[in-house]
Amino acid sequence: MLETTLGDKKYYELSEEERVKLIRLGDEAMVNTYPKSNDGYAVACMTKSGNVFTGVSYLSKTYTLTMHSEATALANAAIHGEKDVVAITGPNCHICKQLIYESGLNSGIDVAIIMEVNGNTRQEPISTMMAYPWPEN
């Protein structure tokens, strides 16, 4: 993981190996989706210290109480005292993009979204995925 800057925020460029690892760990967490295994979404996030935390979707019959995997991953990291998330797997819905963006505002890190596209990994800063961010800073 290489620390750089992007505008006024820190940005972390992950190696191909780190990106593959995050995607794999997110995929492996799918067995823990609730209430049924492999029926929902799962992600993995990496913190500045290099630790990885997974999150899974937790479905509520009301839907409004459903927790998205990105929220549970960020909470999992915070529960373990790690609030500086540098990367999280995607693609992400706009609710989750907003949550990831706000996490970056709080930490001063432009969180990298890690994706697999046509068999190749890539990363994009969350700031480039937020056409009209709120709050702006």
Image (cartoon, rainbow, N blue to C red):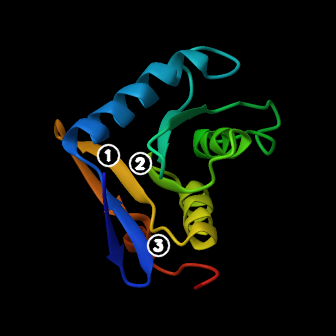
Q: Quadrant of the C terminus?
A: bottom right
Residue 78, how many percent across, how many down?
69, 46
Report the amino acid beneath label 1: Met
| Side of 48 where 65 appears, left or right | right
* Residues tagged 1 and 2 counted as in contact (Cβ below 8 A): yes
| Disc 2 secondary structure class | loop
| Disc 3 secondary structure class | loop
Mark 2 crowdedness (10 Å alpha carbons): few <14, some 14-19, many ≥20 = few
Q: Is residue 35 above or below residue 115?
A: above
Whole-Å distance between the Cαs marked 3 and 2?
Answer: 13 Å
Whole-Å distance between the Cαs marked 1 and 3?
Answer: 16 Å
Report the amino acid beneath label 3: Met
Residue 120, how many percent across, how many down?
17, 41
- The residue pinned by badge 3 equals 130
Q: Which mark is residue 91?
A: 2
Residue at screen point 47% across, 73% down: 130
| Badge 1 or badge 3: first in the primary sequence | 1
Residue 93, how many percent across, how many down?
52, 53
Mark 1 crowdedness (10 Å alpha carbons): few <14, some 14-19, many ≥20 = many
> Residue 75, located in which quarter of the rendered image?
top right
Mark 3 crowdedness (10 Å alpha carbons): few <14, some 14-19, many ≥20 = some
| Badge 3 or badge 2: first in the primary sequence | 2
- The residue pinned by badge 1 equals 115
Q: Is residue 111 above or below residue 19?
A: below
